[in-house]
Amino acid sequence: MATQQKSFSSNLGAIMAAVGSAVGLGNIWRFPYICGQYGGGAFLIVYLCFVFLLGAVLMMSEFVIGRRSQHRTLQAYGVVAKGKKGWNVIGVLGLITCFFILSQYLVLSGWTTSYIWDAVDGTLASLGTDAGAISDHFSSFSVSTWRPVLCLSIFAVLVLVVVLGGVQSGIESVSKLLMPLLVLLVLVLCVRSLTLPNAGRGVEYLFMPDFSRLTGQGILAALGQALFSLSVGMGAMIVYGSYIPVKDNLFSTAMWITACDTLIAVLSGLAIFPAVFSCGFDPTGGPGLVFCVLPNVFNMMGGAGVVFAAIFFILLMVAALTSAISLLETLAASCSERFNWKRLNSSMALFVLTTAAGVVFSLSLGRLSHIKIADLTLFDLVDKLNSIYLPPLTALATIIFLGWVVPDADVRDELSNHGTIKIGYYPVFRFLVRFVVPVALTVVLITGIKG
């Protein structure tokens, strides 16, 4: 087994970095939306069961593979398989997934970066409360050529700078700074949102159990959100697992990360929907909520709305930055190890490749919109790959690998820190790994393909 040359300096550092990886744009707008759409409190109950029983199990599984092997994604599976050939293909699949997710993420993060400037310089405020004007502003911006490309490039440079700083001085230090900042920003927005007139309607929308709206599709949505809101299925947690010190308890680390990720998603809902309902809007999902509805909400707050708009989009950028850092680190560290590249060279090469891909995906919404595959623009195609095919497939292969290929004694040894801590939960964990999680992932994958 290789000697660990890089690691987080503390368990807190590991948790902060992994929480940063897990918390992303989806936590802040997708989770609240689907929670309200599928029964509020009813959805939340189902989601919590899934995220702690299944999502956390997947995270622990990737941690085990990463720390056990002391290698990054491309080589970790082969090392843990102890010479059994062919298993490194899962690592290749994970890096392909990571590459496409980061490339698309840069586009969305570029939009967020641009909207910070629009909030600060008064552009959003100048649109007033004209929903049509706000929507047209987003539409014309997203299909334009230079500004989205410039903004995604600026964001990509920020990600590169952190990754070049290394594991402790870069990723860990920045995560320790940005994650408390993210929590502070979302709490500020929560306080303001909850003190608006009729804010209680938004709280009710999120949390009042309505089992009549919890359909089969809603249960699958809860399952999908739980499994993939923790940055599993793309190799990131294998890399971060290889950085976790041997003395750290993987079970408690995964539970802390899962709890923090869920808490931020719930707080985001409290920051968004009381304000949306207070201003008389019907909630919509995805970019429509963030870039079209919320600017109108902030403008209805008067002069203070400019400040809260800036805070909100800074919050989004922080969430996006911490996730993007983990994705570029996964790619750069894995290629550096596998091909014996210097960290600087691998980071720069992957920065150039992912940024170039992001530029192409951005332009596919406008100037390159005529290029289509299966009647989809390149942006829509990569979005479909990222949301339906690649992460579930990688996660399914990983969980089958841990449950049926890796020796049981090795998994026990890693989770118990070589027999130094008790793992009374292990029989349940093993059952979930071998039977429940593979079935759940298969259902999600088949449903997504058929849908």
Image (tube, rainbow, N blue to C red):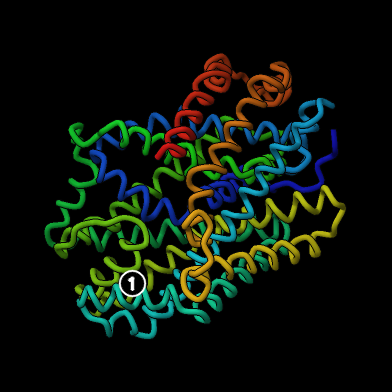
Q: Is residue 216 left or right of residue 84?
A: left
Q: Position of residue 146 (x, y in %)?
A: 52, 81
Quadrant in which the N terminus is drawn: top right
Give the residue at mark 1.
Answer: 309
Q: Amino acid at mark 1?
A: Ala
Q: Residue 384: tell me if it is visible.
A: yes
Residue at 55% x, 78% y: name it. 150
Q: Is residue 354 left or right of residue 83?
A: left
Please, is residue 433 above or below residue 219 in the view?
Answer: above
Residue at 44% x, 39% y: name it. 448
* Number of numbered markers: 1
Please, is residue 321 above or below residue 448 in the view?
Answer: below
Quadrant position of residue 426: top right
Residue at 34% x, 68% y: name it. 291
Q: Is residue 118 left or right of residue 18?
A: left
Residue at 12% x, 62% y: name it. 197
Please, is residue 190 above or below residue 129 in the view?
Answer: above
Q: Dot 1 surroundings within 10 Å: few (below 14), some, or many (20 or more)? A: many
Residue closest to the far left: 198
Quadrant in which the C terminus is drawn: top left
Q: Position of residue 397 (x, y in %)?
A: 62, 31
Q: Is residue 424 left or right of residue 96?
A: left
Quadrant position of residue 423: top right
